[in-house]
Amino acid sequence: MTDATLADTVAPTPQTAPAPRPRRANPLPLKWLGVAPFMIFALLFLILPTIHIVLGAFQTPEGDFTLRNLQGLGVPQVVRPFMLSIKLSLLTAGLGCLIGLVIAAAVTKGGLPGWIRDAMLTFSGVASNFAGVPLAFAFIATLGRLGLITVVLKEVFGINLAATGFNLISFLGLTLTYLYFQIPLMILIITPALDGLKREWREAAEILGASGSQYWRMVALPVLWPSLLGTFALLFANSFGAVATAMALTGSSLSIVPIILFAQIRGDVLQDPHLGYAIAFGMIVITGIANLVYIVLRTRAEKWIK
Amino acid sequence: MMGSPRFWSWAALVAGLLYFFLPLVGMFEFSLRARRGEYSFQAYTNVLSDPQFRDTFLYSVTVALFTIVLGVLIVAPTAFWVRLKLPKLRPVIEFITLLPLVIPPIVIVFGYIRLYNTSSWLPLTGTAFGTNLLLIFGYATLALPYMYRAVDTGLRTIDVATLTEAAQSMGASWFTIITKLILPNILSAILSGAFLTFAIVIGEYVFAALLNRPAFGPYMVWMGGNKAYEPAALAVIAFGITWACMGVIQLATRLSRHNRVQR
Amino acid sequence: MDFLKIEHLEKSFGTTRVVKDFDLTIRKGEFVSLLGPSGCGKTTVLRMVAGFETPSSGAIVIDGKDVVGLRPNQRNIGMVFQAYALFPNLTVAENVAFGLKVKGVGKDEREARVQEMLAMIGLPDLGARYPFQLSGGQQQRVALARALAIKPHVLLLDEPLSALDAKIRVSLRTQIREIQRELQITTIFVTHDQEEALSISDRIVVMNGGVAEQVGAPFEIYNRPATRFVAQFVGTLNLIEADVIAPETGTVRIGTTEISLGRPLKPGRVTLACRPEAVSLGAAEGRPLVLHAEIGEVHFLGAVIRVQARAGRTALSLDTFNRPDTPPPSAGDKVQVSISPADLLVLEA
């Protein structure tokens, strides 16, 4: 459309523009047809199912509008899983951010050889995808009752891991396992932000008398803040929605929201089909807000690190 | 400020590497312990000779292939069309492709079960064929963000709009443009998306489990609850496949860079 | 009083010697420029004085103390960078106050000092702005204020004007010099722009390939260059080939003209050089070297007229002042140009 109007105003000689002219007769239907397959696909398999769930959260089995389902979220069997999931996600996101930042900082700014940075980024790309069932198995094989480290600790160092109270099949064990893909995700996202920290800032701070920690406290961290917080939100959402790793590691012994929902979908353990909708709706709200925070902060961060 | 931070950098790196490599080592070591008292590949032979392994793995591979074809057929033309004819629609399309990352997959499959059950207008879950279809479409949805971003970036890099206009002005037909100009240049992007899709589908659990499909993911979980050493072997195999996929993707991107340099 | 002494400074990166046996003594309150092409080592010398690079050997003594073992944040030095390096998350006032805050100076004293510095650079009302809201020239002035706020005893400037456009460069370099003179602060200024160095320095160090080729006042450097490199790098130079006829009296033959330079020369061919302003149009007393030339390009620059001419095979550049009653020559004119032997430099190989 714009091409035709521009050609009209700019071209001094009446050049023949064959294609635009006849197209002007009915431009809209043909163009939109091109994205129709995609739209139908997205509608049928992404948008409609989600909307169905969201609407279902506000409907009685008869189809009337109700807030009863959402109120049903107030029971301890539902509140506790949500609290647990939130705790788990806060912890894995927080630790993932902290550890990921330290490693990313070490690799980009810590004075290490250049090839280590590229290798770490490649590895993080792979590791952030190594989630789910195989990851759980790997951790069981390493820190489980008969795991490599457990055995080595007992036979070489004489430390009985179980006696210290550590159990892989637990909240803490799941946290440790989740970090395996949270940390690489943090590294992948924060490395460009760290690259944006100009070397001259650190030198200027230093020549003005600041120590390394003062520079980080007064300049680097404030500049990184939006990126850090945004990535925290992303990691939070990532952890909140994860199912397979938990299923393979802790089974149904750890009642986090996805596990509860899974059981509910499978067999209506909560004795109320529409409660499932409400729980799913709760999940969407939480992950939706977290992702919104991430996007908003990321746009803000890009403004500073130009 | 020269010596001290470098020490801490190395310390952080080593600590990180330990955390990341020990589970891999542990997983591999554990998988070799099937025979009491000695290291062997017994667990692997057990797994590979298990008919259920072959069936579920084959099933997942087949589903993955269908998903890739579907994904490419839906994403590539759409990305191309949007870039060329509907640039204003691009933010909307991009937003839609990011939705599978925001909405938890378990919610999506929950929606499928409720929306396409036997008493609905599209009773896909009623038949095995219908459910398989649902699974393929579901996986295509999960892979959508990655597939779209890969192809879209590829198109952006070759500036498809200018390329097409130039070709058209020289009288090339649409068929020629697509097969001789566009496809070869975005081939590496499509390959990246394809292998990422493959990696996602092979190990996927939630969709397959809730739709009751005989896929590799649920098989692995079942093994985890019933066998001691075979799960570790499965994990090694799954990890190896993911690594191989990533490796091919890196190769594909490197080859495309080579093409661009030559021009 | 000698305030900053650099003695036998050496720096190698791997097997490459970037700074070779560099010596320099700077008096208190002096403004010294390090001038040279890129890669000559001038920035490396500056960074060693700042403490960002460690010398391979040599000493840097400031106010009687060898600072080589000190970290940059212990040296009480102010530095202005080419890329301004203002902290993007802090306002202008907070940027200027940064060094004071780090030292633990109290809030009231900090604010007073910030106001003082902002007034000094001529931006008293911009305290609440952020760096991205300022122009390049303003940012660099803030950077200067920030460096000087902590009352350092040495000021280092690393090509501070290179990122700015021409007009700002001229006004800002004057401003920098004025502030420096007022504060009487010992300053090292690194630049590749010889006009910049000539116009504001007390002394210039011309560097090439890691070595200081000449140290001296601008007048000295320009009129009595010690090496061919200095002669060609600073200002424009005319090169005239000549044959030595009588080495003891310094008589040479240029084309068909013979003149005596009054100093002994080595036999053989020799390259003579002179500045454009030393070449005059027309013959005159006291300028016995007369060449016949044809005018090429004439550039009327307003106050100065730059003429390109050709005398046989020698290209000559000629600068003459504009005089309202004398129109400049035209291309193709055949003229006589004259040079005084005193203005001829003999260039070593």
Image: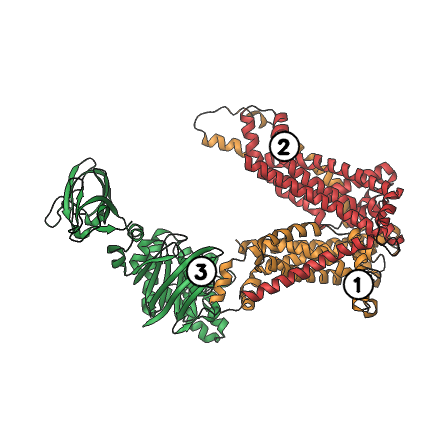
Query: Which tint was used for chain C?
Result: green
Q: Residues within 10 Å of mark 2 (few under 14, many from 20)?
A: few
Q: Where's the N terminus of chain A, which quadrant?
A: top right
- Residue at position x 70%, y 38% in the image: A39
Question: Closer to the observer: label 2 or label 1?
Answer: 1
Q: Residues within 10 Å of mark 3 (few under 14, many from 20)?
A: many
Residue C229 visible in the snapshot: yes
- Residue situated in front as seen by the camera: B9 or A62: B9
Chain under label 3? C
Question: Closer to the observer: label 2 or label 3?
Answer: 3
Please say if A193 is above or below B108.
below
- Residue situated in front as seen by the camera: B182 or C340: C340
Which residue is disc 3 drawn over?
C11
Type of amino acid at the residue the image marks with label 2: Pro
Please say if A231 is above or below B185.
below
Q: CA distance from mark 2 to mark 1?
A: 53 Å
Residue B184 image label = 2
- Residue situated in front as seen by the camera: A173 or C279: C279
- Residue at position x 42%, y 55% in the image: C136
Q: CA distance from mark 3 to mark 1?
A: 50 Å
Residue B158 visible in the snapshot: no
Query: Which tint was used for chain B?
Result: red
Which residue is disc 1 drawn over?
A152
Per the image, label 1 sits on a secondary structure element best described as: helix
Residue C218: percent from the left, percent from the top? 27, 59
Per the image, label 3 sits on a secondary structure element best described as: strand
Type of amino acid at the residue the image marks with label 1: Val
In the drawing, does residue A201 fall left or right of residue C281? right
Residue A257: percent from the left, percent from the top? 80, 57
Chain under label 1? A
Q: Which chain is orange?
A: A
- Residue situated in front as seen by the camera: A257 or C245: C245
